[in-house]
Image (cartoon, grey):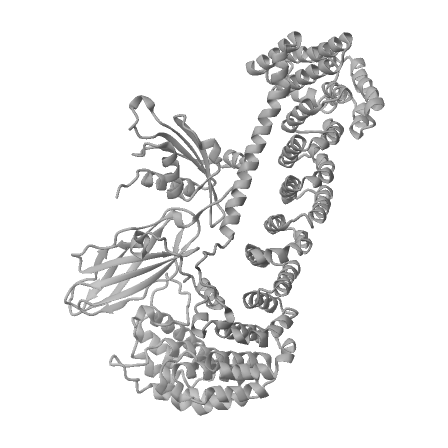
Amino acid sequence: MTAAENVCYTLINVPMDSEPPSEISLKNDLEKGDVKLKTEALKKVIIMILNGEKLPGLLMTIIRFVLPLQDHTIKKLLLVFWEIVPKTTPDGRLLQEMILVCDAYRKDLQHPNEFIRGSTLRFLCKLKEAELLEPLMPAIRACLEHRHSYVRRNAVLAIYTIYRNFEHLIPDAPELIHDFLVNEKDASCKRNAFMMLIHADQDRALDYLSTCIDQVQTFGDILQLVIVELIYKVCHANPSERARFIRCIYNLLQSSSPAVKYEAAGTLVTLSSAPTAIKAAAQCYIDLIIKESDNNVKLIVLDRLIELKEHPSHERVLQDLVMDILRVLSTPDLEVRKKTLQLALDLVSSRNVEELVIVLKKEVIKTNNVTEHEDTDKYRQLLVRTLHSCSVRFPDMAANVIPVLMEFLSDNNEAAAADVLEFVREAIQRFDNLRPLIVEKMLEVFHSIKSVKIYRGALWILGEYCSTKEDIQSVMTEIRRSLGEIPIVESEIKKEAGELKPEEEVSVGPAQKLVTEMGTYATQSALSSSRPAKKEEDRPPLRGFLLDGDFFVAASLATTLTKIALRYVSLVQEKKKQNSFNAEAMLLMATILHLGKSSLPKKPITDDDVDRISLCLKVLSECSPLMNDIFNKECRQSLSHMLSAKLEEEKLSQKKESEKRNVTIQPDDPISFMQLTAKNEMSSKEDQFQLSLLAAMGNTQRKEAADPLASKLNKVTQLTGFSDPVYAEAYVHVNQYDIVLDVLVVNQTSDTLQNCTLELATLGDLKLVEKPSPLTLAPHDFANIKANVKVASTENGIIFGNVVYDVSGAASDRNCVVLSDIHIDIMDYIQPASCTDAEFRQMWAEFEWENKVSVNTNIIDLNEYLQHILKSTNMKCLTPEKALSGYCGFMAANLYARSIFGEDALANVSIEKPIHLGPEAPVTGHIRIRAKSQGMALSLGDKINLSQKKTTL
């Protein structure tokens, strides 16, 4: 085993700027100094040894002058010193001086102070020399009967590690510990003893558990955790034991310790798939999420519930627990709420949808009463979207949901109101029976809408779906009320001139008319009592938008007026009423045009809006059947097409999801019966404890791609040339937040290389965790050096450095071989993700870093190029397949991905096929990347540049 791979239990942070002291001054301090000086000197010695210094001359000095001292700090430091100091001669024999040390520790094991005894026992766990341990065995055994639990529990650990490493020193350890366990009362000692029996003699551990299986609930949580681990291991290795222990696991679900409950629930799910077991485990998980205050714990346990749901038979059991799962919404954290709502939505069925909707409606109303918090708006949006999905899947629920949600159209938060509007638009198109209700509610809230974007959408819905004469007149009344007195220009000029009389008329006139027709409004009383002193506040909403220069809403209003006027003409037979209504609509359009051309608005009307309003005026003056069809039928058809395409897309993605989850079994697949399975076959199933341990250590084996080229060899980087005296190559293993470099160093010379050190430095958001220790390489020998690098963000990192060494016997300076740079691939941190169009646009507007990459490729097909980019960047295409299908010579698509550090990356691909250059011409265009951080945008751009061209094998 090389020095780099020696097991190290002690890591000490060393300030690098201090000058290393000389051996003579340290010797002097250790011999003649007082306790304080000796302590400092000993600390310096430890640091120097950890840095690779040998210091053999100080060993005897420390044994003579420091070892006899009774100071606790020095005793503690000596334990570290004896752990790290070389204890053998170069040929592997134990140093003579260590016998003196051994005697000192025998005395410490009989010391009256329990701390000294306990810490000495703990130190003995780290010793790897059987000759040193052999004389201490009687003293270690005696410590099992010490009065203090600290000594007893460390004695158990010492016996366990000695038994594991050198069984011949204490062959009766399992029997000794079993007897100790039976008589022991302290929880921590029992836990250590039981853990040793699990690993050393499982049968004895089971015998002990069988005797006290009914008292398991009364044990301490640390012992309960070990019992859960034992039951899992036993049942995993021998399934016939399940019936014996499953009751014990059920009992542990009621434990007072959250950790025990969590482990017991996880074990129960792996041991049994009976509905009662799954329900008990799920219930336990839900209780944990609600009672545990740490959000990270909540998210981890929620993931366990989501994993349960993935199993088709477990899903039915979880459907009955949807209402319990919704109790988690009381958590203020948005991420937890998001996961909970998604889980509830996946589990909702016709049996429980009504209860779900009632809970969600209450939650929506609660968000209205809460004092504004930055997450309240986002939570409201989540609730609206969840209700939207429920109503689409279960149309009977829409009638209950719509009245509550319509109140939020007047919300200050535009995003939440936009979600409601989108939902209302889909509902009014899909559910004919709800149209009167939606129109009525829309008219109620119309006047209180504050956002111009929402106002436009509401106008469109009213114009499209008002089908009765009364509704059409109500819409006209509302529009008049929103515009205020007309003509707008004249009334505004009068107001500017200070004539207050018209102002009073504006406030009172329309309001009185509305009281009789529509019922009272809270906003109406505010309007009628407002003073004309503040001109901005007393403007009706639509008038305010127009005076701010937002004339796009005027174009929308002109379309709405045209639609309702054309519909009114077809509903009412009296010519006089028809003309009167048309004239009123045309007057409103004309007064808006007049306002747009005047100098009153902050921005003048655009030519597009003028064209649109003029077209609507022309349509109303002519009233041709063709225009009637376009305005009143074609518009609705296009919405219908869009919604059906969206629904198809959703169904397709759901189908793909369910196909993924359904485990297909071929007709000739063998059926495995648990009862008939041989023991050795059973053990092939993955051990969950082993997997979680590997995951914690970062050693999880990723499933390699089927492609033989995608093997480990792909990740090997050559660092030096074949003719260099030292050849080096590195295998770069990327775990989530850290990178392990496994560097192979080969001595290609006939000399012994001493102090061969790998010196590394990093560029970017990478940080070297520890300095690799130096080694000695025999002629033509090789060694592996491991180095850990921490990663802090998604950015192309570079690791560079050199190998330095001394040639033994040569008087020259240190030799140095410079290594090639190792580039860390950003793709290991980027995962495809999805977001809505609105979120994409919002992020696109917010992110300040943009990187524009020109397309330079040899691919001649647009779709093939897009697929190639998606594959090389790990991004997901948000543009639906239908929008990309067909061939028209150009293509635009939006891509999105998220890094494991939570950073978002957006890209827009705009490409075309230059037809004039012939059919074999490659794709041209550009890709714009946007991200919050500069590193992310640049790194993705570099990745695209490197992988644009298709490599031909």
Q: Is residue 407 left or right of residue 241?
A: right
Can you name the residue that lies furthest to the right here? 516
- Residue 851, quarter of picture: top left
Residue 372 appearing in the image: yes
- Residue 396, quarter of picture: top right
How far across and down, in percent of the image, does residue 54 sit?
Answer: 30, 74
Near-viewer residue (499 or 869): 869
Q: Is residue 898 above or below residue 287?
A: above
Q: Is residue 634 left or right of residue 942?
A: right
Near-viewer residue (702 or 699): 702
Q: Is residue 357 above or below residue 566?
A: below
Q: Is residue 748 left or right of residue 265?
A: left
Question: How many marks can you see?
Answer: 0
Residue 116 appearing in the image: no
Q: Is residue 162 above or below residue 279?
A: below
How far across and down, in percent of the image, does residue 833 sit?
Answer: 49, 44
Q: Please give the name of the residue rendered at 34% of the width and 82% of the height, measured from the top-left corner.
A: 61
Quadrant for the C terminus in the image = top left
Near-viewer residue (670 or 655): 670
Q: Is residue 381 above or below residue 533?
A: below
Q: Please give the name of the residue rendered at 50% of the width and 79% of the height, measured from the top-left corner.
A: 198
